[in-house]
Image (cartoon, rainbow, N blue to C red):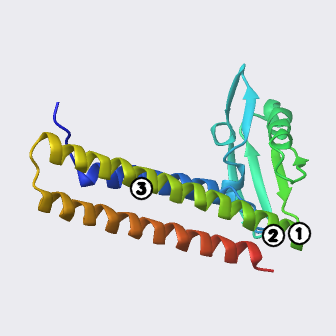
Amino acid sequence: MAAKFELADLERRMRGSLDQLKKELTGLRTGRASSHLLDPVMVSIYGARMPIVQCATVSTPDAKTISVQVWDKSQVAAVEKGIREANLGVNPVIDGTLIRLPIPALNTERRNELAKLAHKYAEHGRVNVRNVRRDGMDLLKKAEKDSGMSEDDGRKNGVKVQELTDKLIKEIDLLLATKEAEIKQV
């Protein structure tokens, strides 16, 4: 079977890596309340594990508090347990069916740790984008060899793949810079 090169497919795969990075970065605590902080929290209720958003409403009434309005008051303890087990560094305060999560201020050491973690996530995203680039270049070489794609077309498509890679790496760097500024902000 002849190798089929599609730039749109490569871009879709690279964007998937970028989307994954965005998701990882939103989970980093920055000292400011964000409902995305609770995205990884899984709760054991009704005999199943489910994301917290499937059993409660998560909101941020102010910059230092996350509130979780549990829909079924018999499940408040299970939701609190799920939050505690997620090790987010927050201490839930229960008020009826409402759970408040005051977000403590970050110290300098923790800010540096979070910045390093953000860099790690960004580097992982860059590696994923470069791996997709490598796959695309291999596919181009195979297409040249198997289906008779001309060398000129191969080079032109190679340049397009590199331009796409450079564009997405810049987007990753911009996301990292934004997150780092958010983390370092006092």
Q: Residue at x 86, y 34 (%)?
A: 77
Q: Which mark is residue 109?
A: 1
* Residue located beneath label 3 in the image: 15
**Between marks 1 and 3, how big is the CA–CA gap?**
32 Å
Question: Could you tell me if the residues under marks 2 and 1 are in contact, i.e. CB atoms within 8 Å?
Answer: yes
Q: Is residue 40 left or right of residue 132?
A: right
* Residue located beneath label 2 in the image: 112
Callout 3: helix, strand or loop?
helix
In the rendered image, which quarter is residue 164 located in?
bottom left
Q: Nearer the viewer, residue 9 or 89?
A: 9
Callout 2: helix, strand or loop?
helix
- Disc nearer the start of the sequence (3/2): 3
| Badge 3: residue crowd in 10 Å (few <14, some 14–19, many ≥20) | some
Q: Is residue 44 left or right of residue 90?
A: left
Residue 35, percent from left and from top: 68, 56
Q: Which mark is residue 136?
A: none
Question: Could you tell me if the residues under marks 1 and 3 are in contact, i.e. CB atoms within 8 Å?
Answer: no
Three-letter residue code for mark 3: Arg
Callout 1: helix, strand or loop?
helix
Q: Nearer the viewer, residue 43 or 8?
A: 8
